[in-house]
Image (cartoon, grey):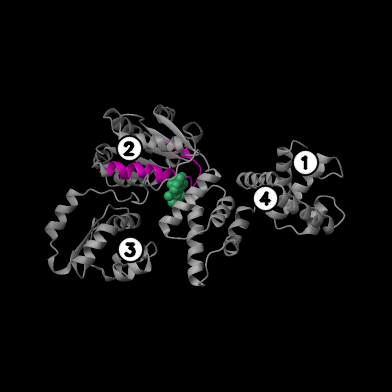
């Protein structure tokens, strides 16, 4: 299989079957005319070539770049009219930096309390590059949208005709090493210093790598002094990265440092609704709420779940209802909750209700202790795989009937008392997002 066919197969995973069969499948790749920075495909007619050009050129270029680390221009031509000179001209015109994922836009980014500050900062920088916050430093945990936001700025700037370089710090390091090896450092300098905006993702990988930090420092200074925008992301605040030259650390803090926190329930719900719309998956409100409570914070996981749900339901021809969702998500939940132990849950409940964990496990009969014990038992049963006899032993109760009695009690309370139900849901959320 040639690389062109490989890329088309990759694209197949990301589009609908109809799109693939009707359009993409009709493309042929011309390995002879293609080079390291040009990929030539032929379509059978203008209708198909126009349709693919409009919809998939960026995506194809993105996939080529991911695969080869080269910026590749994709040309979709008609077999008889293809003219290499024209293709060459087009390359010069469009220095598209296709590493930017075209679907990472501001419109597709859901805003909530957890990310609104970072969003506003990135938006402002994309409107007035080099003028407001320079550098802009975004930090936060895995899967919380740092890359998405950074690339949204990249796409917006590129649409304004700016020369944007987006790279991860690992790629930046590899590129540097390659130029050192080939003794072409001048080219490296020129490339990174003549762009209008430099976006470097996951800068924490430069930690303890002194030579590249030194080079980056000079690139940074050169860009900054000519008013070019720099955007950086990392998993931590610059102060906490460690293994970072002092002067770099202070440069990073010099513009604006904005963090992204794990999304709150409402933001998670908005994100799920948005992803459903994009991926054309139809889910009812209660399923969306369920997924939002099960998934703690990593938004990437939400996307995985939606495609899993969709794929399963297509395979076995069933509608996606709550029961089906729960079944599909079982493994996921167990994985997420692997580190939820009886001790952890009991400690958490004790802290929340302001008593000691040992009191929960004691034989104490005072009202608040019994209350805390019942809640702990209920949550331990819901959130772990322990059996009723195991729980009875842990909580020092006579046997499993005592546990079963407690569970019944809590279930009926939850049915009758809305406040109590909310309290339990809140606790569940807090425990699962802290584990
Ligand atoms: P990070 O770089 O912080 O690890 P990403 O930017 O790669 O995270 O985000 C992971 C996935 O979640 C991406 O597909 C992204 O589009 C999606 N995502 C994250 N936050 C949001 C949000 N607020 N709205 C919509 N999608 C989001
Ligand atoms: Mg990222």
User: Which is more N-terminal, label 4 or label 3?
Assistant: 3
Q: In which quarter of the image is the N terminus?
A: bottom left
Measure the alpha-carbon separation of dots 4 and 1.
16 Å
Between tags 2 and 1, which lies in front?
2
Q: How many residues crowd around disc 4 within 10 Å: few (fewer than 14), some, or many (20 or more)?
A: some
Q: Distance between the residues labelled 3 and 1?
A: 56 Å
Q: Report the span colored magenta.
A: 138-158
Residue holding disc 3 = 7
Q: Classify mark 2: residues with Cα within 10 Å, few (<14), some (14-19) or many (20+).
A: many
Residue 11 seen in the current view: yes
Q: Quadrant of residue 75?
A: bottom left
Q: Do the residues labelled 3 and 4 touch (CB within 8 Å)?
A: no
Question: Which circle, 3 or 2, is nearer the viewer?
Answer: 2
Q: Name the residue under label 4.
A: 340
The x, y position of residue 71, in whole percent, is 27, 52
Residue highlighted by disc 1: 357
Q: Nearer the viewer, residue 420 or 110?
A: 420
In x, y percent, where is residue 350? 74, 40
What's the distance in space between the residues labelled 2 and 1, CA to CA? 51 Å
Observer-nearest residue: 334 or 3? Answer: 334
Check residue 31 for magenta coloring.
Answer: no
**Badge nearest the viewer, 3 or 4:** 4
Measure how far apart labels 3 and 4 are at the Cα level.
41 Å
From the image, tell me which residue sits under label 2. 126
Q: How many labels does the image show?
A: 4
Q: Give residue 383's position: percent from left, percent from top.
A: 68, 53
């Amino acid at each position: 299989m040639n690389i062109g066919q490989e890329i088309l197969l990759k694209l197949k995973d990301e589009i609908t079957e109809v799109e693939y069969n009707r359009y993409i499948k009709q493309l042929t790749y011309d390995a002879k005319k293609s080079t390291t920075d040009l990929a030539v495909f032929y379509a059978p007619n203008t209708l198909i070539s126009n349709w693919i050009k409009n919809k998939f050129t960026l995506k194809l270029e993105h996939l080529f770049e991911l695969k080869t680390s080269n910026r590749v221009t994709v040309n979709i031509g008609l077999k008889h009219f293809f003219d290499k000179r024209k293709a060459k001209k087009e390359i010069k015109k469009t220095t598209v930096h296709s590493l930017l994922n075209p679907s990472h836009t501001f419109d597709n980014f859901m805003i909530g309390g957890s990310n609104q500050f970072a969003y506003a900062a990135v938006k402002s920088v994309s409107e007035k590059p080099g003028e407001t916050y320079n550098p802009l430093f975004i930090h936060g945990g895995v899967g919380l949208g740092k890359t998405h936001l950074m690339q949204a700025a990249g796409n917006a700037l590129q649409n304004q005709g700016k020369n944007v370089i987006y790279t991860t710090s690992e790629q930046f390091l590899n590129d540097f090493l390659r130029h050192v090896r080939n003794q072409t450092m001048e080219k490296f300098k020129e490339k990174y210093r003549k762009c209008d905006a430099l976006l470097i993702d996951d800068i924490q990988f430069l930690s303890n790598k002194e030579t590249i930090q030194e080079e980056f420092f000079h690139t940074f200074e050169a860009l900054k002094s000519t008013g070019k925008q720099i955007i950086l992301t990392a998993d931590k605040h610059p102060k906490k990265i460690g293994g970072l030259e002092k002067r770099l650390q202070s440069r990073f803090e010099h513009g604006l440092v904005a963090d992204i926190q794990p999304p709150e329930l409402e933001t998670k719900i908005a994100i799920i609704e948005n992803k459903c719309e994009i991926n054309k998956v139809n889910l009812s409100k209660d399923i969306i709420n369920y997924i939002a409570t099960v998934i703690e914070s990593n938004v990437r996981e939400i996307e995985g779940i939606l495609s899993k749900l969709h794929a399963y339901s297509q395979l076995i021809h069933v509608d996606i209802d709550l029961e089906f969702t729960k079944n599909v998500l079982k493994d996921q939940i167990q994985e997420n909750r692997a580190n939820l132990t009886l001790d952890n849950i009991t400690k958490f409940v004790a802290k929340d209700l302001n008593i000691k964990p040992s009191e929960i496990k004691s034989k104490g009969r005072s009202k608040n202790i019994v209350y805390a014990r019942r809640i702990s038992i209920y949550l331990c049963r819901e959130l772990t795989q322990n059996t009723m006899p195991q729980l009875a032993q842990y909580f020092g109760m006579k046997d499993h009937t005592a546990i079963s009695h407690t569970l019944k009690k809590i279930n009926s309370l939850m049915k009758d008392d809305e406040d109590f139900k909310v309290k339990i849901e809140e606790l569940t959320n807090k425990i699962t997002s802290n584990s």
